[in-house]
Amino acid sequence: MKIHLTEDQKKALELMHDTTRDSRVCDRIKAVLLASEGWTTQRIAQALRIPESTVSRHLKDYFSEEKLAPENGGSESRLLAEQATELIEYLTANLMHTTVQIVAYVWARWQVTFTVSGMTKWLHRQGFSYKKSMGVPHKFNADKQPQFIETYNALKEKCGQNEPILFIDAVHPTQSTKLSYGWMKSGRKHVKVVETTGNRTRLNLMGPSICSRLKRPLFVSIRRLTPKMSSCFSVQSGKRIRFHKKCILFWMEPVTIVLKSLNFSPRF
C-alpha cells in the first residue's frame, strides 16, 4: 500500500518516533514512513520482524484514521492542546506527590479519564520526572550570599596567615520538615524548593570550622542553642584552639555578643 506524506507530515512522524516510549507506536510509525518511501509490506515486515498481516493492518489504520496507537496504547490524545498546556503549567507551579492525584485533578478539571500507567507515560513525554524536592533553610537569604562571598574573599586576603578565620554554626542532623518526592520537570533548574523549619530534634551540635585544620574539628553537644551558650562557646573555642594572635569569627546565626574583628554577619 502506497502512502503519500508531505514533508511536514514526515517531520511530525519522525519527531513522534523520537519522543514516544511505546515500541508498538514506533513500529507503526516506521511502517508508515517506510511505506511512503516505496517499501513493500513484505520488506517492511522483514525489517521490523513482524508479520506481514500486521504491517498491512498498521498501514490500513493510518490510511483510514491516521491511527498510530493500539487499542490499549494509553491516553496520548485525550487532552486537547490547550488543556495539556494548562496541565503542564499547573504541575510546574504545584508539586503533585502521586500520579493518582494528577489523574483525579484531570478528571475534576476536564472530566477526562486517564489510567495511572497512561498518565505516567504522558508525564514522561512532557519532560516530567519523579524526584525528591530540595530543602533550604526557612530564613534563607539568597541576596546576601554574593555579598558575603565578596566580603569574605577580601577579608581573607587582608588577614593572610596570621589571623585565622573560624566559621561557627549550630547544626542538627534532623529537621521537622520531611522532604518528599513528586512530579517535577526534569533538570536541576526545575527542582522544587521547600523551606525547612527551624525546629531542631534529637541532637544539637555547635562548633567552629577552620579551613586549615579540617582534620581536627572542634564541636560540642548542647541541649539548647541560646545567645548565652553561643557567647560562652566562643570564649572556650579561643582557649582550646590557643591562637597566639587575633582570630576572626563568622557566625551563621546572629548572637548577642560583640566581635570587634567582624561587623558583617550574614544569615544562610
Image (cartoon, grey):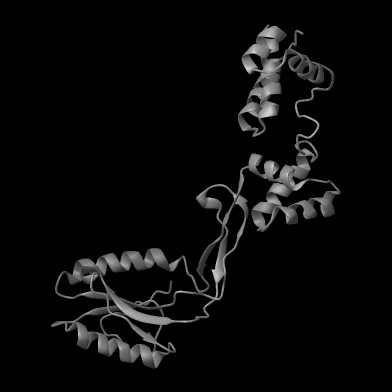
Quarter holding residue 255: bottom left
Residue 16 in the image: state x and y as whole percent.
66, 28
* Residue 236 shows up from this direction: yes
Horizontal placement of 221 versus 28: left or right?
Answer: left
Rendered residue at 75%/11% (across/down): 3
Horizontal placement of 92 versus 61: left or right?
Answer: left
Rendered residue at 73%/13% (across/down): 52
Looking at the picture, does residue 74 appear above or below residue 242?
Answer: above
Horizontal placement of 239 versus 126: left or right?
Answer: left
Looking at the picture, does residue 4 appear above or below residue 81?
Answer: above
Label total for image: 0
Quarter holding residue 71: top right
Residue 210 in the image: state x and y as whole percent.
25, 73
Name the one closer to the observer, 224 or 45. 45
Residue at far right of view: 111
Residue 250 in the image: state x and y as whole percent.
32, 77
Quarter holding residue 69: top right
Rendered residue at 72%/44% (across/down): 117
Name the one closer to the observer, 196 or 163. 196
* Residue 8 shows up from this direction: no
Q: Quadrant of the C terminus?
A: bottom left
Residue 192 in the image: state x and y as whole percent.
57, 58
Horizontal placement of 246 versus 42: left or right?
Answer: left
Q: Quadrant of the N terminus?
A: top right
Looking at the picture, does residue 234 appear above or below residue 264?
Answer: below
